[in-house]
Amino acid sequence: MKEVKFKHKTWEVAAIIQFPKDFDQTKTYPAIVCGHPISSCKDQTAGNIYGKALAEAGFITLAFDASHQGESGGEPRFLEDPATRVEDFRCAADYLTTLSYVDKNRIGVLGICGGGGYAVNAAMTERRFKAVATVVAANYGRLMREGDLTPGAAIKTLEAIAAQRSAEANGGEPFVTNYIPVNEEARKQAGINDIDIVEAVDYYTTPRGQKACSPNKLLFSGLAAAVGFDAFHLAEHLLTQPLHIVIGEKTGAFGSHRDGFELFNKAASAKKTIQIVAGASHYDLYDQPEPTGKALEQLIPFFKEYLS
């Protein structure tokens, strides 16, 4: 494993590149860009689980912190901007083409959760990605629009964002909120019992998955673009690469189960498959050995076939 940085506009993106066993820099290898979930970072599931396993299977893997987040540059901090997140993937492909040991015609992309939605969106217009895979991919725009499922939730959110932007434009302090409850006690006090939220708190706020570059902070005034984003828009026209989708059998508030089927049905890919991991939840497929092992049993052959 090696820590690297690559360029995005005027700042640098922090990443980790991992190599196959017996790596020989005089040879060329297929490569896979690994995109992390919303609120996550390169040192969690994207790099430490999937990036690591795919490197062990013979691929160069590149996992990066999203711009404005983690150890990557970009101001303001804690911004979750879909256009920038999608461009991160293109910049990652740019970087891989500069490495002599990467076969420029054998680059794939894998995204987890919201990173899966971004990976798909990027692949529609990034033809250097020859194969696309997702694990519990979620359409972040759809999730933002649904909000708490009350009528007009999206409009209420946009009104609140507008008011906060006006306040900040007139000298007010930026409002940095949280993606999820800050700990288990806060979750219980809020009365939130959905499986995805329960397991998100367990993953992100305990030693199970907690990392310093994933601080559970979100710039509220920057969310308007996310409300209007659709990760799968035009997939029926532009997503033509081989596609493999992994979802869990258990369903939760983040909606990755239904998003997986929507993506499968919309994609123009002539070669596409969907894998439902029995008994697995959204967060089981982040780091639990048996579910992630089941996912990798199909992800590795998929990438070997289409990046051969």
Image: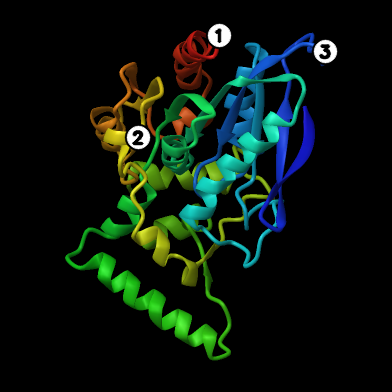
Q: Which of the image's four quarters has the N terminus?
A: top right
Name the side, left or right, on which 156 lies relative to 54. left
What amino acid is found at the position of numbered circle 2 in the picture?
Leu
Residue 216 in sight in this render: yes
Q: Which residue is mark 2?
A: 238
Choose between 9 and 210: the one closer to the eye: 9
Query: Mark 3 belongs to which amino acid?
Result: Thr
Residue 136 coordinates in the image, percent (x, y): 40, 33
Task: Tell me the SS state at disc 3.
Answer: loop
Q: Residue at x 75, y 27 (%)?
A: 99
Horizontal arrangement in the rendering, residue 156 relative to residue 38 (left or right): left
Check if mark 2's residue and mark 1's residue have beta carbons within 8 Å. no
The quadrant of the picture occupied by the C terminus is top right
> Which residue is under mark 1?
308
Q: Earlier in the sequence, mark 2 or mark 1?
A: 2
Please give the count of numbered marks on the rendered protein. 3
Q: Residue at x 48, y 16 (%)?
A: 299
- Which residue is pictured at 33% across the width and 49% down the height? 230
- Helix, strand or loop at disc 1? loop
